[in-house]
Image: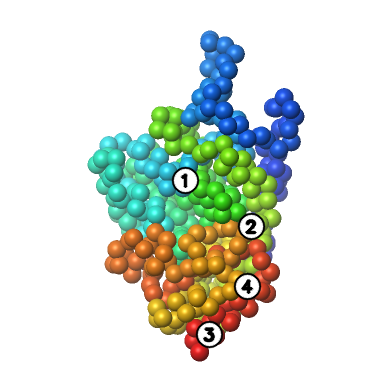
Amino acid sequence: QGKEGFKDVPKGFSTKAIHSGQNPEQWSSRAVVPPITTSTIFKLESLSERSEFMYGRENTPTRAVLEKCLASISNSKYALTFASGCESVTAMKMILKQGAHILADTHIYAGVSSVLTNDVYQTNSEFDYVDTTDLEKLQRSFKPNTQLVWIETPSNPLMKIIDIEKVSKISHEHNPSTIVVVDNTILTPYFQRPLEFGADVVMYALTKHVNGHSDVMMGALVTNSDEIYQKLKRLRDITGLISSPFDCYQVNRSLKTLALRMEKHNENSLHVAKFLEQHPSIERVNHPGLKSHPQHKLAIKQSYGHCGVMSFYLRGKLEHSLKFLQSLKIFIIAGSMGGFESVAGLPIRMTAHWYMPEEFNKSVGVTDNFIRISVGLEDKEDLIEDLRQALEIAFE
């Protein structure tokens, strides 16, 4: 057993992250670091066989390197990258049949919810929220035309944990062709592998922890299904929902240090969470690594650790939240997460929750005293001291 009861990460992850798809012999220069190929066209050796590279919208060497590596560390057959996480969501929605019914957990990321609920492509789709921790309610929510079940675990920003195996089993019992998608942005393939629990597709906003340097926007979908892959690949080839060669180079670089970064995020966030949990100005801390988390046992059963993201409620009002955030010196007030730097924010006033109806935010627990932080790679003692002094000022 690993720290705080989490399972040990299976051996071999970093070796795959460093070497899968990276063979220097694939380049005439024998470059150890895969080059950035910006060309949009490629010379064809034959007109009788389809080449791997023909046109940049379909594939490029730099993108191919990243996708091979991402599939390897995800223990999947296929990986497809897109220009953003929300474009990945859009692609999944677009491969559904007209009039599809979509089920999504109540606590999925608000940005994903916006894509799934807005029928901008006029697909005549239906959409329902359901608390997927209530398995009986989930079973009652299916319709004859349910084609997609979307969950996020841990959820952003509430850190709710969903049983991937049970949700996948129930969904496939309803209809084997129902596609179960797990948004695994928070934990990355280093700390969680949803395909191993029966999910059909795993979605990543690579923008966050996977890239980890706050300098790239990209999404990805990984799967073992030949049929789903072919549909997504064809859709991407036609629509051009592609990631650029430079961005692919950046993310491929970041995969090499993913294990090291995630271990440090895990270590730092646990120390910060324990500090916050005992602080008198904190009402509740949402961190799956804490034994006080209502789904802690499930978290350590299906994942290998946690990242830097957590949330908590102040024992105060909006004025305390604003004063707390404005008093931070190391944590940066920003709307994203997963970078090497520590950031903090008030979800109801920033991120996608800003655009969501007030009733929706209240129903999922996003309130004026609700804070989300992404603990970075700084020294944990400095981060704790920064939080301590900001809380002192906010409640003086």
Q: Is residue 71 visible?
A: no
Name the residue that disc number 2 marks.
262
Q: Secondary structure under badge 1? A: loop
- Amino acid type of the residue tagged 2 in the rendering: Met
Taking the image as shown, residue 242 lies to the left or right of residue 257, namely left
Whole-number angstrom distance, CA of label 3 to CA of label 4: 16 Å
Nearer to us: label 3 or label 4: 3
Q: Where residue 271 sits: x, y (%)?
A: 63, 72
In this view of the protein, which residue sits in the foreground, 79 or 305?
79
Crowding at label 4, few (<14), some or many (≥20) Cα neighbours within 10 Å?
many
Taking the image as shown, residue 180 lies to the left or right of residue 206, namely left
Q: Which is nearer the N-term, disc 2 or disc 1?
A: 1
- Amino acid type of the residue tagged 4 in the rendering: Leu
Name the residue that disc number 3 marks.
393
Name the residue that disc number 1 marks.
84
Q: Which residue is found at the position 35% from the left and 49% from the top?
A: 115
